[in-house]
Amino acid sequence: MIKIAVLVSGGGTNLQALIDAQKAGAFPNGKIVLVMASNPKAYALERAKNAGIESVVVSRKSFDDPADYDRAVVETLQSRGIDLVVLAGFLSILGKPVIDAYPERILNIHPSLIPSFCGAGFYGLRVHQAALDYGVKITGATVHLVNEIPDGGRILLQKAVEVLPGDTPELLQKRVMEQAEWKLLPQAVAMLCEQLEQEKGN
């Protein structure tokens, strides 16, 4: 069984999509065993509690040195025997120690069709505002593996979503979540769990 940790910073809507998918049997080879928040006020912690999943806060603000923060993240994950890390609205950039500890085993969801509207500074509503400012007719979401370049890792899945006349960043964000993010993330987790389970078996 692949042990999954979901890293969150806010409301946890993508976490909820994963919890719901897990209940529906979407990833039989994996189980979410830990929710780790960078923010003690993240509503995602409440979602974890309601689902009976262990949660822990490793606050970025508690560490002056980013390397110390990365080490704390790695120690927290490894102490639970985590195999796969899923970033679901996690706003802290992970450094080399975390990426080295989990090569090709950290997933991120980004609310655009990478390489558009991605990289440092592009998160949350900023992404959707940029898409609207540019006038694109199609946007979407991307699940990719995490490397040391923000939003720069290998793409696993993408799904397009139409931009409609009269869209605001908030409306577009909601549509991208519902039509793309909440579908893609469980799908990618299932793919990775199956792959990691096979690697364990070999």
Image: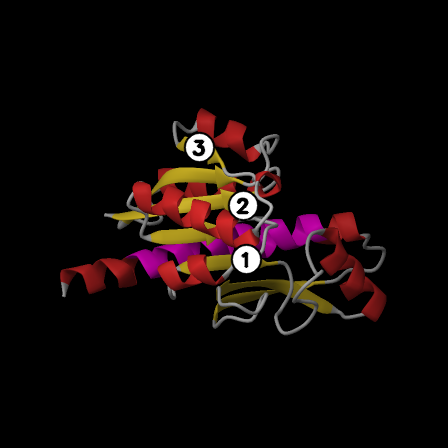
Write down the residue under mark 3. 55
Q: First in sequence, mark 3 or 2: give its number.
A: 2
Residue 125 spot, x, y in % from top left = 74, 52
The C terminus sits in image quarter: bottom left
Q: Considering only vertical position in the picture, is 94 above or below 34?
A: below
Helix, strand or loop at mark 2: helix
- State yes or no: residue 176 in magenta: yes
Neighbourhood count class around disc 2 (C-alpha, 10 Å): few under 14, some 14–19, many 20 upward: many
| Residue at 43% from the left image edge and 57% from the top image edge | 98
Write down the residue under mark 1. 109
Judged left or right of residue 134, residue 96 is left
Write down the residue under mark 2. 14
Indicate the quadrant where residue 100 lies.
bottom left
Q: First in sequence, mark 1 or 2: give its number.
A: 2
| Magenta segment boundaries in residue numbering | 173-193
Give the foreground label among 3 and 1.
3
- State yes or no: residue 26 in magenta: no
| Residue at 51% from the left image edge and 54% from the top image edge | 67
Q: Considering only vertical position in the picture, is 73 above or below 147?
A: above
Mark 2 belongs to which amino acid?
Asn
Residue at the outermost left position: 202
The answer to whether residue 34 shows anywhere in this view is yes
Mark 3 belongs to which amino acid?
Ser
Q: First in sequence, mark 3 or 1: give its number.
A: 3
